[in-house]
Amino acid sequence: MAGLGLALQPDFLCWKDLESGALQTVMEDWSVEPLALHLVTPPGRGKPARVRALIDYLADKLAREPWAQRPRGTL
């Protein structure tokens, strides 16, 4: 990929390429605010079991991803 330019990508899209060396970090002293991920549900106290199950699954799955385990800037 050498010479193809610069890109600002979230870790979850490029962490494997950074770890393998296919991509490299440049401008290490420059950063942006982390992006938030939101799951929007209808208002109200009760959530159907299937919605609660989805929320629990996503929270668990995303927290276990390798890119979520690394402190920022460690690639």
Image (cartoon, helix red, strand yellow):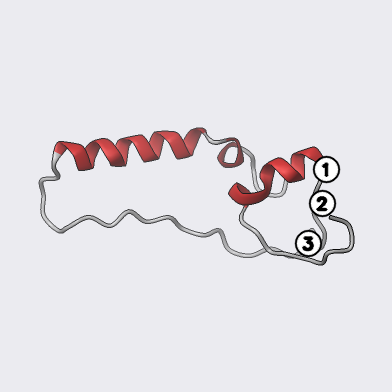
Left or right relative to 14: residue 37: left
Residue at coordinates 51% horizontally, 60% vertically from top-left?
A: 35
Q: Is residue 34 left or right of residue 9?
A: left
- Contact between marks 2 and 1 (CB within 8 A): the answer is yes
Q: Nearer the viewer, mark 3 or mark 1?
A: 1
Instruction: Give the CA separation, mark 3 to mark 1.
Output: 19 Å
Give the residue pinned by disc 3.
Answer: 29
What residue sits right under mark 1 in the picture?
Answer: 21
Q: Secondary structure at mark 1?
A: loop
Q: What residue lies at 81% left-to-right and 63% top-to-bottom?
A: 27
Q: Residue furthest right?
A: 3
Contact, mark 3 vs mark 1 (Cβ under 8 Å): no
Give the CA distance from mark 2 to mark 3.
Answer: 14 Å
Q: Secondary structure at mark 3?
A: loop
Q: Amino acid at mark 2?
A: Gln
**Corner quadrant of residue 4:** bottom right
Quarter of the rendering occupied by the C terminus: top right
Q: Is residue 75 visible?
A: no
